[in-house]
Image: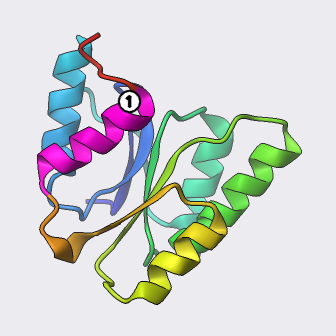
Amino acid sequence: MPEHVVFDAKSSIVDKIFPLVEQLYRILANASGKSPTPPPDASDGIEAVELFKKQRLNIIFVDIDMPYKNGVEVTREIRQYERDHNLDQTPIIGVSGFTERQYEEQAFAAGMNKFVSKGTGYQLKDIYRIVVEYCGDPKT
């Protein structure tokens, strides 16, 4: 199973190893009235950037520790692409098992909007709140 997928109730690259993502996908798909279909996937940072270039996304969850390009590099490339193409910034949420402050600082310096540590007890309701904060409530 790939580590990163694109969510398509409105679309996002998400960290598949984050334990709540599949539940969140079902809830948002049901809330938005769309039937849950398997989203296209990106198995590494290079694919994640290419996927972003091909499909406009509403929110991105990106793992800090990905193969080939880490989440910080992916974020920098996405932000540069947005600048180069005069696009509005897509909210990028960094997800990491690392709890050291340096990773959070690197994430924000690269242009991430929020940083979530998988080791701090985040639950489905917390991730749902992030999606609602940046994308609006799918029920409305």
Kind of element beneath mark 1: loop
Label 1 belongs to which residue?
8
Q: Residue at x 30, y 22 (%)?
A: 137
Asked if residue 5 lies left or right of residue 56, the reply is left
Front-lying residue, 43 or 133: 133
Callout 1, which amino acid? Asp
- Residue 14 position, x and y percent, is 37, 52
* Residue 59 versus residue 44 in the image, above or below: above
> Which quarter of the rendering shows the N terminus?
bottom left
Q: Residue at x 66, y 41 (%)?
A: 89
- Residue 5 position, x and y percent, is 38, 49
- Visible residue check, residue 105: yes
Front-lying residue, 26 or 129: 129
Q: Residue at x 23, y 24 (%)?
A: 29
Assess disc 1: are there few (<14), some (14-19) or many (≥20) residues with their C-alpha within 10 Å of its C-alpha. Answer: many
- Visible residue check, residue 35: no
Segment colored magenta: 123-135
